[in-house]
Amino acid sequence: MAQELTVDVAIIGSGTAGMGAARAAQKYNASIALIEGAQYGTTCARVGCMPSKLLIAAAEAVHEIEKAHRFGIEVGKPRVDGRKVMARVRGERDRFVGFVLQAIDEDFPMVRKVRGNARFLDDHTLQISDGTIIRADRIVIATGSRPVAPKAWVEALGDRLIYNDHVFEWDDLPESVVAFGGGVIGLELAQALHRLGVRVRLFGKDGAVGPLSDPDVRAAAADIFKAELPFHPDADVRVISREGDEVVVRFLDHDGQEKTERFQWLLAATGRVPNIDNLGLENTSLPRDARGVPSFCRSTGQIGDSHVFIAGDANAEVALLHEAADEGKIAGDNAGRYPDVRERPRRAGISVVFSDPQIAIAGWSRQEIDAREIDYEFGEVMFTGQGRSRVMLRNKGMLRVYGQHGTGLFLGAEMVGPAAEHIAHLLSWAKQAGLTVQEMLDSPFYHPVVEEGVRTALRVLARKLRMGPVPVEQCLDCGPGG
Ligand SMILES: Cc1cc2nc3c(=O)[nH]c(=O)nc-3n(C[C@H](O)[C@H](O)[C@H](O)COP(=O)(O)OP(=O)(O)OC[C@H]3O[C@@H](n4cnc5c(N)ncnc54)[C@H](O)[C@@H]3O)c2cc1C
């Protein structure tokens, strides 16, 4: 006899968004079921943000040593012990996962934890894979996303085709990897593996470099990464096949010659899809868009005017950790207080790629500004000659800042360059505060810092908006190298 359960709120998925939703909903003394179909621990801690940054940290250590001779310091060629690198990645990853498991155990005493995959039978009824039926007054979908690769690769390559999840399970570093996907995950992992001594080739599509949308910033980024590793942002790959335990790739090289190379693994970083296709949404009356994604309100998480809410990667909007956390909180709060659904303000945009140099978008990207048909200008700075960046031998890349004609409002920025993770915070806070370009220029800038480059770009922007003077070239009284 299948078990039956009736709750006020059912939450499908116990990742970052699901846990946030449970935390918010339990404030309303609601009876809650938190349903998890796979492992506890979250994508972020297990196979996402944290293990990728651990791998990158090891790669940066090698890179700094290799670079030391440019400061006049000779340390010899570093030897990478792949087993030790992966042991640290997995060990620290397990520590982070451990904190999540502890939170699942300790932070939700009143929440009923259900194991198994959930599917909608109708608007209020879920069936769990073991047959359990859950009737819920309100439901939060927080099912995350999963990586995908073209079907032909799956069939041709079998177990030689891997995703990010597999990388963080390695005991040792492999000899070679061909990575597909010039987006965030492909770029981060390919560069890190390359720096750790793995023979890597990275193929992208349509010129994409991370999330950059400004064609000039994107071109600058492509040039930087192409100079360091074999990277084809607009790849022409002729054949991908498997011979024995090797992946064989035939492609057109930068010189226009056809080339064949063999690799141990093909790492597919070719995109992620929301986990909504096996949810039985067709059994509900929930409105969905052409892709089958539930139509929801970004300020409430509510799907249509229903009792169902959606949060995190599952909504196919912005697949970032802090967005998943915010959306989980909003959806859970509204599921708890339903039908008194409240709109919550969303934060200004920020996204960072932990490549070297880092890539970042703060506020609106150029593409988002274009879509809004705003009358705008951009100011820019190249980091090649920027004082502090040069001091640190990190003088690569460029920053573009965008501002609105008439109002002088700061709209957003795209960059590849030094300290991008920090500059992106500064700029997204400015966007959220609704600052004008002039107000930003009136704010303090220390010397000598990379942020002086931001000031240069803002000065150029103010001038182009016809709101400021012609910037002084090589302004030494502003600080050498500013
Ligand atoms: C390699 C990589 C690096 C990343 N790096 C960063 C970074 O540096 N910064 C950043 O901001 N973001 C990063 N991200 C993105 C970030 O990890 C995600 O946006 C975030 O973890 C999504 O959280 P979530 O709660 O939506 O999904 P998840 O944490 O994936 O949770 C979803 C849960 O739902 C469960 N589930 C699915 N379907 C069902 C079902 N039918 N029934 C029951 N349970 C179900 C799943 O098993 C899973 O546990 C990275 C992602 C990857 C893959």
Image (cartoon, helix red, strand yellow):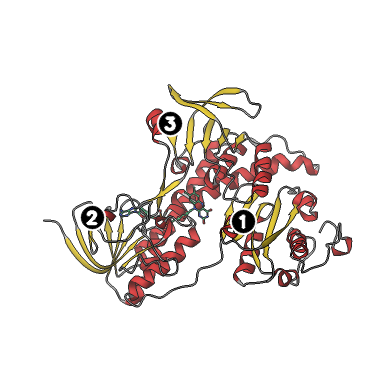
Question: For the residue marked with disc 2, what is the amino acid?
Answer: Ile
Please give the residue where the numbered disc 3 appears in the rendered image: 160
| Residue toward you, 145 or 291 | 291
The answer to the question of whether label 1 and label 2 lie on touching residues, with beta carbons closer than 8 A, is no
Q: Is residue 10 above or below residue 337?
A: above
Residue at 66% in and 69% down: 409
**Left or right of residue 211: residue 391:** right
Specify the quadrant that holds the N terminus: bottom left
Which mark, by number, is residue 100? none
Determine the secondary structure under disc 1.
helix
- Is 413 or 198 nearer to us in this picture? 413
Location of mark 2 (residue): 128
| Ligand 1 within 8 Å of the CB at mark 3 | no
Circles 1 and 3 in contact, beta carbons < 8 Å: no
Depicted 235 relative to depicted 430: above or below: above
Left-right relation of 116 to 470:
left
Mark 2: which secondary structure? strand
* Residue ID for mark 1: 366
Label 1 – label 2 distance at C-alpha? 44 Å
Q: Quadrant of the C terminus?
A: bottom right
Q: Earlier in the sequence, mark 1 or mark 2?
A: 2
Ranked by sequence position, the earlier of labels 3 and 2 is 2
Task: Determine the CA span between mark 3 and mark 2.
Answer: 32 Å
Callout 3 secondary element: helix
Q: Is mark 2 within 8 Å of ligand 1?
A: yes
Kindly identify the amino acid type of the residue bearing the numbered disc 3. Arg
Distance from label 1 to label 3 (Cα)? 38 Å
Q: Is residue 30 left or right of residue 248?
A: left
